[in-house]
Amino acid sequence: MTNAFLGCIFAPLKKTIMKKIKKTSKLLILLLFLTYSSSFAQDINAHSDAQNSKTHDFKITTLNAEWLSCLTSGPKDRELQINNIVSLIKTMNSDLVALQEVGTSNFYNTIDTLVWRLGSGWEGIVVPWKANNCSQNQGIVYKKSKINLIDASLITNGGSYNDWSAGRFPAYYEVSFLVGNKQIPVAFINIHAKAYADATSYSRRKNASIGLKALLDKDFNTKRIVILGDFNDYLEGTICGTCGGISPYKNFMDDVINYKGVSAQLKTVDHFIISNELFSNYLDNSAFREYSATQTIPNYSSTTTDHIPTSVIFRVSDGLEIDDYSSSNSFQCYPNPTTGVFTIQSSKFKVQSVEIYDVIGKKISSHHLITSSSNQLDISHFISGVYILKITTEKGIVTQKIIKTH
């Protein structure tokens, strides 16, 4: 065939093919544009959702300040020591610092001096078990923009006088995390356990731990608890060479449903144990020792303290866990523990709905009770364990804990 003849045959076909290619190209371009637009819109919506769902971090630190303000023990230059503690707290940028070995007397309150030197955005309190500047009291300092103090006292019924180092009882601070216009109640228990590695001191630490846990299990079992301070021993193992290698705080560590030693992996005696109400708010693996902050202070161990601070971070989301003690205490769940059916009762508020979460924060079920007069729920099909009830009322939301048994 000649080229002219082939041209006559394929020319019309070529035009048809080119038209289809152009049409297909336009469709392909349109499809790509729609796909990109959809993806872009999803990215915008995801970004918007992230912006609308804010989180708030609270950095909490514990520090043994080594005889702070005592003239006969600890670092010799008292003025330098307290200035170094102030500098350290500012460098760490913590929201609340629990201190051990803080002196106070009728003539000189160390916490007041710390707060004054930290600045107008800070507050603090010490609850002395013995009011003199060498009495090794526990105190806290905190940022007013992040923390609200509700109450403070000594816990004198969670272990004996002797076991708590002859009267150095735990200090209890009832505070709230400030999240926008909401307050998230948290209870801090600042301990300074009996020191030394001998078997007798170990036994006193162990007995004090048993007494404290018994009290918390009985009277504090619905509160968000943070036990922090100078434990004077490990959470895994012990400093006592003749005590079988078992931590005196094994009772807390074994109760994995209700407590978690979040600093257990750190080879330190300055620790944090949290209750299950805070499991979902603890930022995983955030427990660390503040080596970097201490390195900003010359001759830190001799001029400031022989302890390295330990810090953790709690994270709270907007719209989560609106609670206050007054309304929480007006609710009763019974029987608790329960094998299945239990009742939620309140003399003040009408229950509208209940959400049930497991201890790691996963929602298990939701229930609308606004038309119910009995406020009864059946969790007989749940596995045994601890569950958190998020109860919605006409006044807001409170949380309660329910224990499911066989």
Image: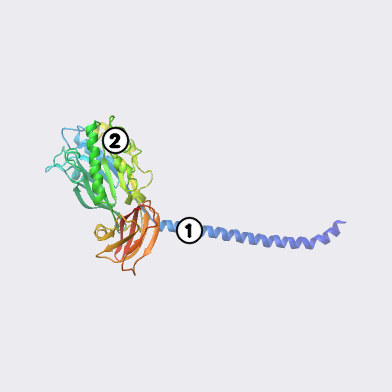
Element type where label 1 sits in the image: helix
Left or right, 2 with reference to 135: right
- Crowd rating for badge 2 (residues with CA inside 10 Å; few <14, some 14–19, many 20+): some
> In the figure, is residue 259 to the left or right of 114?
right
Query: Residue 372 placed where, x, y %?
Result: 33, 68
- Where does residue 237 sit, x and y in percent of width and height? 32, 35
What residue occupies the far front of the structure in this picture? 406
Q: Please, which colouring scheme is shown?
A: rainbow
| Residue sitting at x 24%, y 32% | 199
Which mark sits nearer the N-terminus, 1 or 2? 1
The amino acid type, in three-letter code, at marker 1 is Ile
Q: Amino acid at mark 2?
A: Ile
- Relative height, residue 155 to residue 38 (above, below): above
Of 129 and 9, which appears nearest the observer? 129
Instruction: Give the foreground label among 1 and 2.
Output: 1
Residue underneath mark 1: 44
Up-down: is 346 above or below 256?
below
In this rendering, position of residue 199 left or right of residue 255: left
Above/below status of 289 relative to 341 = above
Specify the quadrant of the image occupied by residue 380. Answer: bottom left
Between the residue at mark 1 and the residue at mark 2, the CA separation in whole angstroms equals: 46 Å
Looking at the rendered structure, which numbered label has been put on residue 297? Answer: 2
Q: Which residue is the extreme one toward the top?
A: 241
Could you tell me residue 14's position as x and y percent?
76, 60
